[in-house]
Image (cartoon, rainbow, N blue to C red):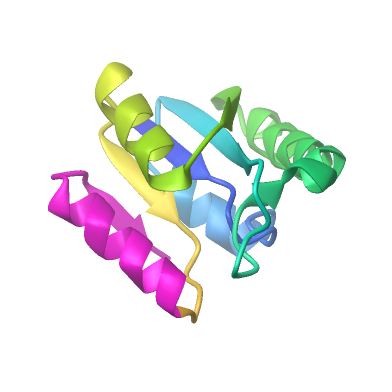
Amino acid sequence: MDVLIPILSKTENQDTFLDTAAEGAGKIYLMIVVEAKNLEYDFGFTTGQISLGNQLMEDIKKYLTEKGLLVFDVLEWGETIPKITNFYFLKKIKKVVLKKQENDYFKKLVKELKGKKLNVEVI
């Protein structure tokens, strides 16, 4: 099963989250979406945070590959929801796993992704 883990909260590198997210996965895609505009919420990455995002992705990739998983990293530029949606259908992803956040933008993101018929799991 192919799993997409968008790195949105900057806290996805927690072992318990990663272990649950990776359960049953054959391939894992880690995705960072860089939005060139300033974000209204502490969500995703702006152009000034690319190095932070890359380091976080490398830490996660190292953790998962040490567990024997096949991990790919993806860096996208643009808007978060369309980038996740397009990648999901392009790569025939089976599940998008998101780290739970307590803000309205996250709730909107989950609702929109589910509305586009993506299999979304929030941990």
Q: Residue at x 77, y 34 (%)?
A: 58
Q: Residue at x 44, y 70 (%)?
A: 105
**Image position of 112 with respect to 101: above or below:** above
Whole-percent x, y for residue 5 in the image:
49, 43
Q: Residue at x 86, y 38 (%)?
A: 51
Whole-percent x, y for residue 23 in the image:
41, 45
In the image, the segment drawn in magenta is 104-123
Q: Is residue 29 left or right of residue 10?
A: left
Q: Is residue 68 left or right of residue 29?
A: right
The majority secondary structure of the magenta stretch comes to helix
In this rendering, the count of numbered labels is 0
Which residue occupies the foreground of this view, 46 or 114?
46
Q: Is residue 107 left or right of residue 44?
A: left
Furthest residue in direction front, as rendered: 37
Whole-percent x, y for residue 65 in the image:
66, 28
Q: Is residue 115 magenta?
A: yes
Q: Is residue 1 visible?
A: no
* Quadrant, the N terminus: top left
* Quadrant, the C terminus: bottom left
Q: Is residue 103 magenta?
A: no
Q: Is residue 116 left or right of residue 42?
A: left
**Image position of 60 with respect to 40: above or below:** above
Whole-percent x, y for residue 21 in the image:
45, 50
Q: Residue at x 46, y 55 (%)?
A: 20
Q: Is residue 35 visible?
A: yes
Which residue occupies the foreground of this view, 77 or 23?
77
Quadrant of the rendered image containing residue 53: top right
